[in-house]
Amino acid sequence: MDIRIIIQLDNLIVNEITGSPKQLASRLSITERTVYNYISFMKKALNAPIVYDYHRMSYVYNNDCEFKFIR
């Protein structure tokens, strides 16, 4: 897993602007399958409460969630 993609993904989820998985893959320059792998990793390993909101057409956090990444 590339931490840079996780940071980008987190930012898009926080702002509720991921779009569909296909759009998200294009935005991050990765495959759609890789999007699903990152979402799964974040949910399982990082306990991120990620769900897909069909009204917003975006992945969102269904509970408060904040990651601290040190650069």
Image (cartoon, rainbow, N blue to C red):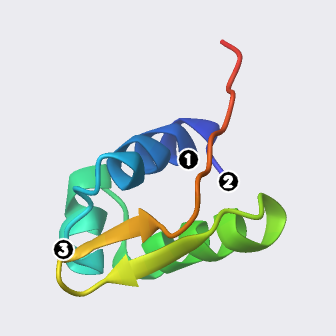
Question: Which residue does the image show at 48% across and 79% down from the upper left?
Answer: 51
Separation of disc 3 and disc 2 at Cα?
A: 27 Å
Front: mark 3 or 1: 3
Front: mark 1 or 2: 1
Q: Earlier in the sequence, mark 3 or mark 2?
A: 2
Residue 13 picture quarter = bottom left
Judged from the image, the secondary structure of the residue bearing numbered disc 1 is helix
Separation of disc 3 and disc 1 at Cα?
A: 21 Å
Image quadrant in which the C terminus is located: top right
Of 16 and 45, the residue lying toward us = 16
| Residue 46, horizontal then vertical, whole percent | 77, 58
Judged from the image, the secondary structure of the residue bearing numbered disc 2 is loop
Question: Which residue does the image show at 62% across and 41% down from the upper left?
Answer: 66
Of 69 and 66, the residue lying toward us = 66
Going by the picture, which residue comes out furthest to the front?
63
Is 22 rendered above or below residue 63?
below
Q: Are marks 1 and 2 in contact (CB under 8 Å)?
A: yes
Q: Which three-letter amino acid code belongs to the residue tagged 2?
A: Met
Q: Which three-letter amino acid code belongs to the residue tagged 3?
A: Arg
Per the rendering, the mark at residue 56 is 3
| Residue 21, horizontal then vertical, whole percent | 30, 77
Q: Which three-letter amino acid code belongs to the residue tagged 1?
A: Ile
Question: Which residue does the image show at 64% across and 76% down from the upper left?
Answer: 40
Is 69 rendered above or below residue 25?
above
Q: Earlier in the sequence, mark 3 or mark 1?
A: 1
Question: In the drawing, does residue 2 fall left or right of residue 11?
Answer: right
Q: Which residue is mark 2?
A: 1
Q: Residues within 10 Å of mark 1 (few under 14, many from 20)?
A: some
Question: Which residue does the image show at 22% across and 54% down from the upper left?
Answer: 27
